[in-house]
Every structure is written in C-alpha cells, then in structure tokens.
Image (tube, helix red, strand yellow):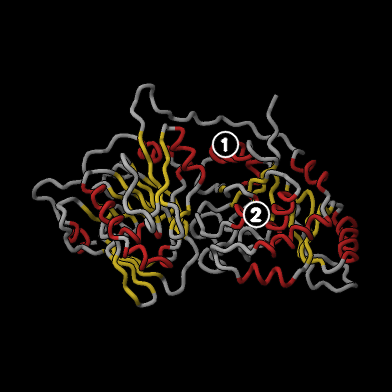
C-alpha cells in the first residue's frame, strides 16, 4: 500500500516575495491549528528570509526542476512531508525556471520560481491565489484563474460580505470551490513588506493567519491535499559510510552573520556518517576540535564585517585549518568573509585572508541568477571538467587578487567565469549549490581528499592564467 503524500501547489504572483503574504497566512493559519506544515520554495537558492520557518516551526525546503532530476524532486518532496501533515509547494505559473528566462534580471530578489513543471511532475493539486483587492462591489469579472486550479484562495477581501460574494462568483464563473480567504489588513501587509530580511513581524503574520482561519474550510483543504496518489519513482540509493570506516566531523557556521543552508545538505551528510557541529565565526575563539570539513554558508556577513574582522583568533584558527591541509567549503557571504577584504558602502574591512579575492557589496543587489559552471581544475569538489548548476549570488562583486600568499600553497580560480576560487583545500563559491542534486559532490565532502592542488615545479602561476583569461 502506497504511503499518502498530502501536498498542494500554491500558485501565487511573480511579484514576490516568497512566501507570499497569502502563502504566509495559509501556512501560519494551518500551524495555529496544530498542522505540521512543510513549505517548499520552487527556486533552490538560499535566502536570509526565513519567514516560512518562523511561521511553521519547520525549516523551509526547496524543489527545482532546473537543478534537480525528476527522481530527486520526487524523493525530496516525499521525504520532506514524512514528518508533516501537509506539504505546500509555492511558486508562480509564470515564474522563471532556468537560464535566459524572463524575470530573473529584475523584480523582487526573492521572487518565486516556476511552479508548472513541478505541478506536472509531482501531480500536485493546485490551490490558486486570486487577488480581489480593490474590486468594486458591482464587478462581474475576476482575475484569470489558472485552468489547472482545483480550488481557489481569495486574497485581499475587505469584509465578510465580500468574502461570501466572491465565493459565489468564483463558483458561478469557474465551478471551483473557495477553500479560504485572507483579509486586506493593510497595516499587517505594510509591516511585512517593510520588514528586514532577517526579521519576522510575528503580530502581523498572526493577524493574517487569524483572517485566513476565519474563512478557511480545513476539511476541504485536507481532502484536496490527499486527492491524488503520489507518482511512482525509483529512489536513488543513498551512499553510506562503510562499516568500520572512521567517522568525520563537519563544523558549520551558524550565528547572526551566517546561517543559510539547505536542510537536505545536512541530511545527506548525516546519511554518510557525518557528525555535525555548530560554531560561530562571530563569537567563538576557535573551530571545534577534530574537524575534517568546515562549511560557512551565505547570510549577512556585510552587516557584521567589523565584528568578523575583529575576531582574529577565529581567523587564525581557519588559516591553521587550511595550512594543515584540511577542507573548507564556503558560499556567498561566507566566501566574501574568507577573501582578502570586504568593501561595504565605501568602507573596507579585512577578511580572513584565505581566498584570493576581494569582495564588494553590490550597490544594487541583483536577483540570484541560474548558472552552469565547468570546473577548470581538479579539486576535492570534483575533477576538471565537472559541470555544476546553481544560483549565482547577486549581492557581491568580485575582483581576483593574485598577490602571493605567505603560505606556499596553491590558489586561484576553479571556474573560468571567476565565481569559484580555491586555496589548497579551501573552496569558495559565489554560486549556491543544492547538494541534494549533486550526489557526487556531497560524497566528495565526506570522502578522501583528491590529490593536492599544489602545482608541480615550473608550473604556471595563477596570475599568469588570469592575465591571459
């Protein structure tokens, strides 16, 4: 007997942010009724906005048909919903999917991704958000409702009478049930729109959740989520640590400056036998003991650059880790921190001095850009010629800094486009990778080192390569 996978597609606007205000009202409202709600974004790029996690108490997850093969998407949704009562996959039917698609060069930097491929692949019953804000009392027309929709969630109703009237109008014009509505609540919406990326205006979200619950048909939502059997798929066998093999410790940065990680990454590492330990580049004086791999993800390093630079004992510990031949993997703001310097609003702060790059916070941050990169050299991340996909951070502008380091280790670029850098076994990426879609890479995190990146005698220096690039 197939285990049910209760799930919904929530079709929202391309205007962003993700989760949408209606989406937040839905997941927070269900959580208030003691439903365990797992929210999925449809673009696998991390963001400091953890509104979904705050609203549900469960870390947000990601699905992305551009990054992930079909069996990975199927496995991640089924696995993510195992500990939940419902999975909500939020995105836009007009949203972007891959390189060259509309909407990635402009708009909200946290805009939703493309929902349509996931609806088809995962056979998701669709709940369409229909905005009725500002519609006049005598209107006989509604915004277009997607033909794939199985039910409607009204957004922006002003009164109970409006909710009842638009419910009848939807049924009359489309034949679809309305399973909930969210009030206009302009003050709550303003608070959400004005909130900083790392802030969570709890009272505003609670007001929206209460508004949703006032009009929600929870039995209908539950029935809709269970209305379709889950597609059959062959789950990829997980690679596990052989019996008797030594364990390994992974230290990952988590504090006010860093903390953007995919939950699937930690689950994949744990399945390989990793012991996961937290540390704080802001507050700790050294790395945890006996660490094999250090991970520093994206976050808000620019807001804490002075404090990071002043923690010289942590910087010394990271440098010693590299000089001992141990591995570090960083992304986005973590890679900027490991560089020579960070330039923020005209003020230059020293970095950890490990990677050969100078980072400058972009004056106008760009939305994450989907990119495909080919590794130009062998590394423990993968052999030369390996192709990886991910989302290029638009928050940092980079400049390669070929000034020789004191430590005689190899350093330079790992990709021709200049967004992967290395120094010995430290790898810094400005492309966010979703490791659940890259089993070979996550296995390399736990596996033995590849041969050293140290150049043989007489080899070309990195600045020579850069001069001819």
Tell me, for residue 448, which label it has, or none: none
Lower sequence index among marks 2 and 1: 2
Please name the residue shown 69% across and 65% down the image.
204
Task: Please give the name of the residue rendered at 53% of the width and 38% of the height, measured from the top-left corner.
Answer: 72
Viewer-closest of 285 and 250: 285
| Residue neighbourhood size for the residue with mark 2, other residues' Cα within 10 Å, grouped as few (<14), some (14–19), many (≥20) | many
Residue that lies at the very extreme toward the top in this rendered image? 243
Residue 266 in the image, given as x and y percentages of width and height: 47, 41
Is residue 382 something that shows in the picture?
no
**Which label was assigned to residue 75?**
1
Q: Is residue 454 above or below residue 395?
A: above
Q: Secondary structure at mark 2?
A: helix
166 or 356: nearer the eye?
Answer: 356
The C terminus lies in which quarter of the figure?
bottom left
Name above or below for residue 463 compared with residue 241.
below
To which quarter of the image does residue 22 belong? bottom right
């Amino acid at each position: 007997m197939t285990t049910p996978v209760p799930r919904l597609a929530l079709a929202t606007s391309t205007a962003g942010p993700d989760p949408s205000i209606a989406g937040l009202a839905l997941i927070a409202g269900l959580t208030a009724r003691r439903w365990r709600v797992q929210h999925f974004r449809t673009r696998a790029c991390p963001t400091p906005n953890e509104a979904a996690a705050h609203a549900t108490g469960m870390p947000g997850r990601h699905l992305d048909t551009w990054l992930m093969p079909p069996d990975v998407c199927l496995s991640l949704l089924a696995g993510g919903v195992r500990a939940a009562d419902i999975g909500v996959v939020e995105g836009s039917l007009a949203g972007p999917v891959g390189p060259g698609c509309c909407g990635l060069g402009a708009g909200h930097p946290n805009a939703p991704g493309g929902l349509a491929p996931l609806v088809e692949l995962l056979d998701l019953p669709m709940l369409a958000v229909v905005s009725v804000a500002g519609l006049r009392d005598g209107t006989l027309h509604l915004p277009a409702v997607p033909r794939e929709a199985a039910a409607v969630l009204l957004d922006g109703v002003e009164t109970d009478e409006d909710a009842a009237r638009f419910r009848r109008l939807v049924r009359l014009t489309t034949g679809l049930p309305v399973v909930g509505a969210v009030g206009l609540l302009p003050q709550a919406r303003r608070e959400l729109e004005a909130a900083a990326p790392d802030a969570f205006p709890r009272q505003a979200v609670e007001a929206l959740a209460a508004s949703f619950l006032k009009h929600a048909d929870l039995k209908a939502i539950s029935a809709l989520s269970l209305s379709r059997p889950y597609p059959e798929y062959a789950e990829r066998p997980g690679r596990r640590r052989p019996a008797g093999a030594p364990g390994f410790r992974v230290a990952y940065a988590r504090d006010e400056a860093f903390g953007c990680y995919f939950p699937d990454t930690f689950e994949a590492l744990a399945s390989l036998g990793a012991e996961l330990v937290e540390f704080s580049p802001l507050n700790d004086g050294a790395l945890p003991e006996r660490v094999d791999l250090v991970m520093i993800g994206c976050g808000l390093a620019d807001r804490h650059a002075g404090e990071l630079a002043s923690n010289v004992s942590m910087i010394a510990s990271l440098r010693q880790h590299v000089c001992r031949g141990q591995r570090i993997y960083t992304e986005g703001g973590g890679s900027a921190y490991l560089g020579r310097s960070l330039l923020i609003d005209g003020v230059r702060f020293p970095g950890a001095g490990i990677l050969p790059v100078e980072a400058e916070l972009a004056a106008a941050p760009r939305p994450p850009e989907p990119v495909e990169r080919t590794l130009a050299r062998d590394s423990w991340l993968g052999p030369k010629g390996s192709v990886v996909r991910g989302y290029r951070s638009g928050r940092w502008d980079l400049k390669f800094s070929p000034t020789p380091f004191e430590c005689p280790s190899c350093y330079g670029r790992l990709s021709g486009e200049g967004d992967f850098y290395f120094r010995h076994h430290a790898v810094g990426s400005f492309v966010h990778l979703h490791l659940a879609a890259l089993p070979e890479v996550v296995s390399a995190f736990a596996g033995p080192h590849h041969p050293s990146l140290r150049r043989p005698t007489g080899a070309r220096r990195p600045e020579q390569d850069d001069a001819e690039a």
